[in-house]
Image: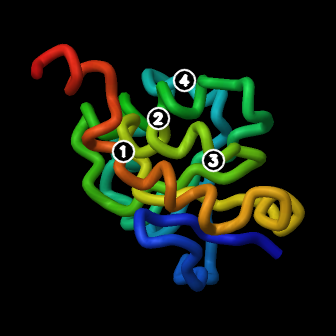
Amino acid sequence: MSVIVTDTGFQADDWPEEICKIDGLKAIDLHGDTSPEALDPSVLKASHIRILIPGFADGRGYTLAKQLRRKGFSGKLRAAGPIIADQYAMARRSGFDEVEIPDALAARQPEADWLARSDWQGASYQVRLKA
């Protein structure tokens, strides 16, 4: 199982049951190392994209999320993997709507740890530089 993290804490998983790879365009799983240039443009029509991030030190999924948003993807975008609470704000600023973490990680970093980082819009250095 896994735990879904949003700006309001841990949530029930509402991801579509049927996951497909491009066909059907409802929910698509992409690996974090997927090149945005290699994606078929029809991917942008999907309602849900989950980017599988293999490790907390691998930032390629964040780059992919940013590129998908820049290309016009407006559906739900989820990061899935061993992401730590300290990375939540960065995930949100990259374009992710939510984060899916393993149960064991949620036990080590409870909901309060994630909520402490939920002010992702005001916590960036860019915002502080503009002030």
Q: Mark 2 belongs to which amino acid?
A: Met
Q: Are marks 2 and 1 in contact (CB under 8 Å)?
A: yes
Structural crowding at the residue carrying mark 4, measured as other residues with C-alpha within 10 Å and reported as few (<14), some (14–19) or many (≥20): some
- Decide which of 30, 4 is in the foreground and name it: 4
What whole-number distance in Å separates the C-alpha atoms at marks 2 and 4? Answer: 20 Å
Q: Mark 3 belongs to which amino acid?
A: Ala
Kind of element beneath mark 2 = helix
Which quarter of the image is occupied by the C terminus?
A: top left
Residue holding disc 1: 120
Nearest to N terminus: mark 1 or mark 3: 3
Which quarter of the image is occupied by the N terminus?
A: bottom right
The nearer-to-camera label among 4 and 1 is 1
Give the image's coloring scheme. rainbow
Figure quadrant of residue 108: bottom right
Give me the disc on residue 85.
3
The nearer-to-camera label among 2 and 1 is 1
Residue most toward the left? Answer: 131
- Decide which of 13, 122 is in the foreground and name it: 122
What whole-number distance in Å separates the C-alpha atoms at marks 4 and 1? Answer: 26 Å
Residue holding disc 2: 90
The nearer-to-camera label among 4 and 3 is 3
Nearest to N terminus: mark 4 or mark 3: 4
Give me the disc on residue 35.
4
Residue most toward the right? Answer: 104
